[in-house]
Amino acid sequence: MTETDFLSFIDQHQAIIHRICRLYCDSQEDREDLCQEIIFQLWRSMKGFDQRAKPTTWMYQIALNTAITDLRKKKRQADLTPILPQATTSEDDEEQVKYDALRGALKQLSEGDRSLMALYLDNLSYQEMADITGLSVSNIGVKLNRIKQKLQTILNLK
Amino acid sequence: MELDDLRNSWTKQPTPALNTEDIRKSMSETSRPVVKKMLNKLLIESIAFSLMGVFYYGAFDGDQKPVLLNLLLITALLLLVSHHLILYILTKNVILKTDLKSNLLASYQRLRTHAMISLCIRMLTAVCILCFFGSVITWNSSKLVKLGMIIVFMIAAIWYDHDLWMRKLKKLKEVIQDLSAGNEKK
């Protein structure tokens, strides 16, 4: 992959990075810092990337690893207050309420569970999730069921 | 609220759009937030230890000590100031294993090595400084008080550092254990 290819690849798939940053960071500043670090790590790891693998698999791996291992956790997790949905009328507002409710609930999950949810929310197949995480397909299924139940409980409690 | 329904809200939510220039900037080492932070620390610590160096020369009879002892102290301070840089150089190689679980395990091992290196540097520095002060000093009550204050400060700093590293390691270990729980070989 040349520099031009890399730029175009990131440009095309940058939403994946932004969604992971949104999942792990509260403030805009932290999200920007993490996004920058993920792109840098992707660029640096490009030489070691196995071209036979799917580029997005590599992107998820590096992005999640960077988000989890980055050391400024304290600042990032400062605000863990669930975001409560508010009554609205328009369709857009309703979407926003759903999104806020989900984001609030996701923040209550452990970081490991959150990484699996990041993949689930992006509509990845169990096989793709297994390739990214290194877990078996059956274990992904078991874990996701447990996490979904946990999320459902949190959302119903609100 | 159903999860599948919420999943649509998650993917539909607009995300920022970086242009090519923003992406290119992110690829540069010097613009990394972690590097900027490290350089700031390096600057602050360099100033602090330079001041300490100036202070010791007058207040702790530095000019009357053998060159070897002075060198020992300078080496210790340089090691302390540059330890962020040493850790940074050690992290230059990106960890790229076959999957996230292996990546996290490798990151944990690396973090543990960093913790050990960092704490060893701190302790080595503390020992060097104490050897320096304790070697040929002419003790009086005022100097003993100053030395005592330095010892307390050093122990507290090393303890705090140790605590921080342990917390980081524990947190990462929890994520790995959480992710690996119940997993059989693929």
Image (spheres, rainbow, N blue to C red):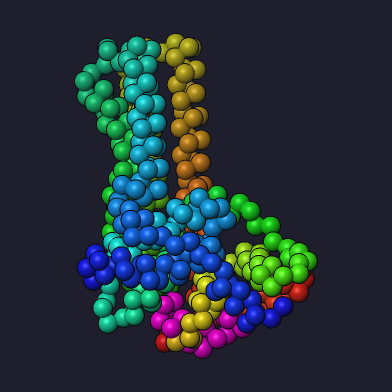
User: At which x and y percent is residue A15?
Assistant: 46, 68
In front: A3, or A142? Answer: A3
Query: Residue drawn 27% across and 31% down?
Result: B75
User: At which x and y percent is residue A118?
Assistant: 52, 72
User: At which x and y percent is residue B162?
Assistant: 47, 46
Image quarter for residue A142?
bottom right
Query: Residue drawn 55% across and 86% down?
Result: A141
A26 left or right, relative to B38 = right
In front: B81, or A113? Answer: A113
Which quadrant of the rendered structure holds the N terminus of chain B?
Answer: bottom right
A154 left or right, relative to A10 = right
Is residue A109 depicted above or below A139 in this figure? above
Residue A69 is a magenta residue: no
Which quadrant of the rendered structure holds the C terminus of chain B?
Answer: bottom left
Q: Which residue range is magenta in the image?
A: A128-147
Query: Residue drawn 41% across and 77% down?
Result: A132
- Look at the image and tell me whether residue B116 can be seen: no
Main SS category, magenta section: helix
Query: Residue drawn 31% across and 69% down?
Result: A8
